[in-house]
Every structure is written in C-alpha cells, then in structure tokens.
Image (spheres, coloured by chain):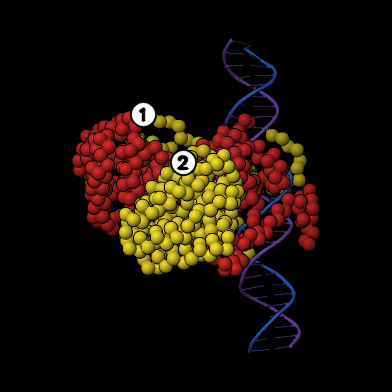
Chain colours: A yellow, B red, C blue, D purple
Amino acid sequence: MSTKSSPRAPQRSRTASPNRRERAVDHRAAGASAAPTFKPIHTRRTFEEICERIREQLALGVLKPGDKLPAERELAQQLGVSRNVLREALRSLEMAGVLRLQKGVKGGAFIQQGDTRRMNEVMRDMLSLGTISVRELSEARVHVLDLVVQLACANARRADLDALEANIERTELATKEGRLLDRVECSREFYKLLAASTGNKVIAMIVDSVTEIHMRFVYAKVASSGVAMARLAEKRRQFLAALSERDVALASRLLRSHLESVQRMLEQDPGAMSLHVALADVQPGMRR
Amino acid sequence: MSTKSSPRAPQRSRTASPNRRERAVDHRAAGASAAPTFKPIHTRRTFEEICERIREQLALGVLKPGDKLPAERELAQQLGVSRNVLREALRSLEMAGVLRLQKGVKGGAFIQQGDTRRMNEVMRDMLSLGTISVRELSEARVHVLDLVVQLACANARRADLDALEANIERTELATKEGRLLDRVECSREFYKLLAASTGNKVIAMIVDSVTEIHMRFVYAKVASSGVAMARLAEKRRQFLAALSERDVALASRLLRSHLESVQRMLEQDPGAMSLHVALADVQPGMRR
DNA sequence: TTCCATTGAATGGGTGATCCATTTAATAAT
DNA sequence: ATTATTAAATGGATCACCCATTCAATGGAA
C-alpha cells in the first residue's frame, strides 16, 4: 500500500465497508424459452440501488407527489452511502422528472407530479441514436392521430372545443401579422389540445411526443424556406366543425388530407430536411 | 471569510471560477399567446449543461452509438468541471439509456444503441405518480392494439407470423405443464411480437410500454388467484389465422373480444388488483 | 405595534484529493 | 509457447470542504 504521508487526517478503515450490498442471486427459472440464459449480472451499483429503493417507495405509495425526502446529508447517512453517490441517484431521478431539487433552508428533494414531457425526450433520444427513423415516426403519428380523431369525436367536451377555437384564432392572428414561426407554435399547440380532448392522458402523451418532433421539422422548414401552409386556419375551422358535429368520417378525412399536404411540403427539397438540423437547436416553447 | 486553517493544501481561488457558464438570455418573442411570461429562469446547473452538450453532440451526429467519451478525469478537465459533477451528468445519461459505463482500462462511457424499454419506465413512473390512471392505460392499450392489428395485417412478414406461431406453441406447452406464470410471460411476448410485426418501431415501443404494465396486473392476478384464461392458445391460433389471411375485420374482432374477456377476469374481485401490488415487485423477464 | 433590515442556520451546488476494484496489456517466469 | 505477475488506466465511492440561496428568527427604527 502506498503510504505517502498525505495530509488527509481520517484514514478510516475503508475496506469491507458495512454497506456493501450484495446481489441476491436470482435463481428463478421462468422465461418463455427454456434456453439457459446466464448474462445479466452487471454488478449492481450503489446509485442504481438507491434509485430503485426510491422508486419502490413511490410504487408502494409510501412516497407521493409533494412529499419531501430527507436532506441529502441525512439521507446519505441513513442509507450508509456518501453524499456524492446519493446525489448521483437524486440527479438521475430529477432528470427522470420524479424529483425536483430545491435550494435553501426548507429546500430539499420533492416528489413531483409526473411530467408527461419526459416521453418527448425518449423519442428524441431514440431518433438521435438512430433506433427509430423519421419515417416510422411520421407514420406512427398519422395513425395515432387518426385514432385521436375518433376518440376526440367521442369524448371532446365543450371546453376542449373552445380551446381549439381560441387556438385557431391565434393562428389567424399570427398569419395576418406574418409571424410564421409563431404559427408553427400554434400548430403544435393545436395538436396538443386535440390530443387532450380525447380525455386520455396516455394517448395525449404519445401524441405530444411525436408531434413535438414533427414540429421541429416543420419549424426548420419554415425558418429556412419561408414557405407556409396555405389556408391553414380555414382548414382548421372545417376540421373543428366536423369535430363539433361528431362527424368522425369527415374529421378523419380532413385531418388526413391536411397531414398529407404538410408531408408533401416537407418532402420537397429533402436535402435541407436533415435530422440534425431539426434536432439540434431548441426552439422557444419547445423546451423540455 | 472563515479562515480556519484546515489541512487542505490547494485553496485555489474558487470564486469567479473561469467556467461559470452564464445563461444566454433568450429574448425571442414567440409563444402562441402574447401574455408576458417571465418565469422560466431556474439557474441552469452544471450537470444540466453537461447533459445537454452531450445530447447536442448526439443530435448533431458527432457522437454515434459505439463511440466512447473521453475518460472521466480528462473530460472533466476539458469541460472545466469537477469529476464529481461530471459523473452526475454521466449517471443521468446512463439511466436515460444513452450511455453505458464500463470499468477497467479500455473502459469508459460508450454511446449505446437506443433502448426502447426506456418508455416502459416512463409509463411506470407516470402511473406511480398518479399522472395517468390504470383506466387510461387500459383504454389506450385497447385502441392502440386495434391499430396494431390493422398495421400488422398490412405489413406482417412471413418471419413475424412464424415467430407468433412459435410463441403460441410455447403457450400451449406452458398450459399443458401448468406453468401459469410462464404463460403470462408468453402473453407478454405475444404482444411484443405482434407489435414488432407492424414494422414500425415507434408503435412497437408504445405497445410494449403499455403491455408491460398491463401484464403486471395479469401476473399479479394469476399469481394470487390461480385463475387462468381459458382456451388461450386456441384463441391465439384463430387470431393468427385471421392475421395470416390479412383479414383485418376478423382479426380485430377476435382480439377485441379477447381483451374484453381478460378485462372481465381482472375486474372480478377488484380489491385485490391494487396498483401497488402490480407495480411493486418486478417479475422475471420484466426487468428493465 | 408595525415594518423592514440583519443575521444565521439549513440546504442544495460544486470542488479536489484520495482510495478501491476491475479490467486489460505488457512483462517476466516457467 | 504458455502461464503467472505486474502495472496502468478506468469507473466506483468516500471524505472534507467551500459557496450561494433561501427563509425564519431577531432586533431595531418608525
């Protein structure tokens, strides 16, 4: 052991620390196939354990949104880990949208209301990493939106329709004043409102995540070429009318034809529509 | 300033450190509504900045799956941050499935192929936090699966159908041998294969995430009550036949009626179907 | 009494030094 | 040629700090 006399005082016994969590070896057979699978060890690390424990408390309902975790220094001691490694865990959970860390006395780690925008990030990462393609994303969006129209026709409430109406008015205003990029932002919001009008947050979350990315491409296109979808507000009005009449077939047809025309707009001059251009910068309102 | 002479040697000037990143104040107007919004400062923290920079490199295509980041010590120096805070960022990215950290010489932080299972975790968290409900999840699942049937009828390839066939055989075997929980695992895999047969990974990812949770409920039910869906393999065979014939209407009808009967099974004795029971423990094969 | 400035403690944010365990390549011994 | 040893690089983890922010308690001025 290197005994260079450093100025570190403590030098406590470090080996065989009392909090070495050993992996409970998992002998459960199961698995659909009877193939002997032996891989997945990967030495559980402290911060994973911590994350899991906190998520467990969450799933058990012991921790609920609004609750506060003990202070870092105290929780670290309770868990028998260093403050640094605890912070790694808290950071991960914060990035995952589970926690919010707040400074100052009376600060701490607070359990958050779930942030549905997390799914956007998943989609973005999958696209960045090449796991999914733009084509798959567009296709999924078209199909899911078709489903959304059905559900919205069935479930949309007065307030939902009013919100869509208000959105269309903002779109008209932006069009009149030539604020093209704001109009894109209006579109993003339109689909968000439409998705919300299904009354199903799972579906809304899915739609938002694919729409967020789609709109980046539209944004990039509009910003670079200055082109803009013609008669946008008018088309929206027709669609909203069909939705208000609960006319699934018509609403569905209108939306589909609109989506196709947008797609054509995006696809002309395809060279400019780089994945990287669209994903690279973050536009206002599109922040996570 | 407290000048208690600690044994710490360096004591470098710490204030006004050269790597204080200041927020480029964002004056872009935009936003759909003209309401003067002033909130969103929240003092960007170092680890967020680091995460974002790495994601940026990813989106730009500078970093690709398989690439290795510089060693922690070196990267920390390059970024002008401490190694600890760099690790917080790397940890977050690892949890997000973007990186994999590997020990030893020749180890490091490697960019990963995107892991679609991340979406499962999002769903789970949203459910744990009460942001979405089981009802919404089931409803979304039914609708999305209906869409899946359409797409699968249109796109499923020979290999996909064969995989489904093989899965049904495993289901039969498990049934014959009374391995009820394995049979649940087979079901999970069945839907995974079905989703994959759409040829669209976005949709597959969505289906998998909702199915994973659904199956936890089924698993909990089967494990606690010992009941089991009757004539499962037989129903699957009928469905697969319809799928092979590209008979959307029939396949859709068969699946829907099956899903309804499963739902009925789950809903009898509703007291036992606690959210916490289903989410709390992690079954084999259902690990992230 | 009421109000406002000051103070001080608690908390998250961040740093640097150090040690440990694992992994791999280079080297030495057989 | 094979095998054991060694050394270096890397992530994993800890400790002991310091800083900036926040907010309740305190105390003096109006």
SS type, badge 2: helix
Answer left or right for B86 relative to B202: right
Please give the count of numbered marks on the rendered protein. 2
- Asked if one can make out residue A261 in the rendered structure from this viewpoint, the answer is yes
Q: Residue at x 47, y 46 (%)?
A: A263
Q: Nearer the viewer, residue A232 or B180?
A: A232
**Which residue is disc 1 drawn over?**
A35
Q: Which residue is depicted at the point 64% across and 56% down?
A: B44
Please name which of the two marks, 2 or 1, marks the residue nearer to the observer: 2
Q: Which quadrant of the figure has residue A269?
A: top right
Horizontal side of residue A61 vs A154, given as left or right = right
- Which amino acid does the dot numbered 2 rest on? Arg
Judge whether residue B188 can be spotted in this image.
no
* Residue A154 image position (x, y, % from top left): 32, 60
Q: With respect to residue A75, does B235 lie above or below?
A: above
* C-alpha distance separating marks 2 and 1: 35 Å
Residue A198: x and y in percent read 37, 59
Question: Neighbour class for label 1 at 10 Å: few (<14), some, many (≥20)?
Answer: few
Amino acid under label 1?
A: Ala
- For the point 79% across and 53% down, the residue is B13
- Residue B264 shown left or right of residue A59 in the figure: left
Q: What chain is tagged by disc 1? A: A
Above/below status of B244 relative to A148: above
Q: Residue at x 53, y 65 (%)?
A: A173
The mark that comes first in sequence, 2 or 1, is: 1
Q: Which mark is residue A135?
A: 2
Measured from the top left, where is residue A267 in percent x and y? Answer: 50, 43
Quadrant where the C terminus of chain A is found in the figure: bottom right
Q: Is residue B206 left or right of residue B87?
A: left
| Label 2 close to label 1 by CB (< 8 Å) | no
Q: Secondary structure at mark 1?
A: loop
Q: Quadrant of residue A201?
A: bottom left
